[in-house]
Image (cartoon, helix red, strand yellow):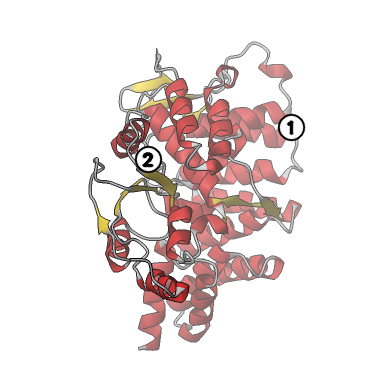
Amino acid sequence: MIPENPADVDSELKSSPILCGERVAFTGTLASMTHHQAMDLVGQHGGTAMQHVGQQTSILVVGEEGWPLEPDGLPSIKLETARQLHDKGDPIRIVSESEWLKLLGIEPPERKSQKLYTPAMLCQLLNVSVHTIRRWERAGLIKAVKKVYRLPYFDFDEVASARRLCELAASGVRADQISSSLQRLHAVLPNLVRPLAQLEVLARGANGLVFRDDLGLIETSGQRLFDFDPPESDQDQNEGPSTIPIRPALSLESSDRERWSAEDWFREGCQLADANEIDHAIEALRMATIGDPLNPSYHFHLADALYRQKKPHAAIERYHMAVELDHKFLEAWTQLGCVLSEIKDSAGAQAAFQIALELHPDYPEVHFHLAGVLEEQHEKEKAALHWRRYLDFDQRGPWAEIARERLADIEM
């Protein structure tokens, strides 16, 4: 029966749940909520949430924070099943998370990818070390969106992408398989252009990128390499998963090393440090500082290596040298403050952090570290100011949880 009044039709449509009759499944990591929350949302809008994809599924939502790839690098079973059903003529729709939220008329909460993060913050969010972040930057896998007095800020999605690519390659998945899977996902997730470019860097044989896993060294092609000098078992506690791209270091026995420039020695030192050959790295970085004693970056990286060798006082001297040569070297001031705090020089640590904040008042982790030092000195009200300031920049990470806990204790 056709309604006489068109307004009755409009009213009926508006009163119908948006997902009435729809059977919705999800694949990949959602950026806006957990899968459980998304399934509850389906029910609230009149639909039925499904754990698996089948002939009754009408919508498959692809998450935008984690690619729907299996450990072998192939697209997820749900996505492949949905594609096969679609190719057979089944009326199943494959939509991105953003498209699904738009359908529901929901504005997603702010995603991590809409912010920029320093290496230390990414270290907490992605469970990879700061050394790894710097290594990826040197290898060209990630690029800083901006730099403030040498301090790089990165896009979360790009760094998370590098981490996932490294995990897949380290597990033996060939680069061409990863590329094929990403290209198939591109139709649903158009923001996969940058990961494809990163994969080119990762797979480029000229770069000599290899990985270390439990069995030794492996190329991205899957070819095993002889590992004559495996790392010590007590690697850095914060080094993260063994999915880190390294470049084989230049040989210290190279016949032409007498002609190396300071920059050659610096690259050698960085590559040795990447391979966890800290003693040799320190030797090479010292040679770099001898060749160019006025380069603050050389002193900074030497300080980092000395710290990793558990020589905090020697590291402090080199951090001091770095900031003497470049007073605006933000990361050097921050590292100096952290190491001073570690050896219980609270006054020195506070002074270093205060200088960093004078240079860059919006430096998130310095607020975090300074709050901790102030709290240790029983200056709780001052500490609370910096805990709150840190939360202006980060609401979701593990450091944010610590900041909230500290604030709650102070305000009790």
C-alpha span from label 1 to label 2: 49 Å
Q: How many labels were placed on the picture? A: 2
Q: Residue at x 63, y 71 (%)?
A: 354
The secondary structure type at the circle numbered 1 is helix
Q: Residue at x 34, y 61 (%)?
A: 19
Along the line of sight, the residue nearer the viewer: 55 or 407: 55
Residue at the outermost top position? 255
Q: Quadrant of the C terminus?
A: bottom left
Amino acid at dot 1? Gly
Which label number is shown at residue 291? Answer: 1
> Image quarter for residue 216?
top left
| Left or right position of 270 against 33 | right
* Image x and y of residue 89, in percent: 35, 34
How packed mark 2 is, by other alpha carbons closer than 10 Å (few <14, some 14-19, many 20 or more), is many
Closer to us: mark 1 or mark 2?
2
In x, y percent, where is residue 288?
68, 33
Which quadrant of the rendered structure holds the N terminus? bottom left
Q: Is residue 326 above or below residue 394?
A: above
Q: Amino acid at mark 2?
A: Pro
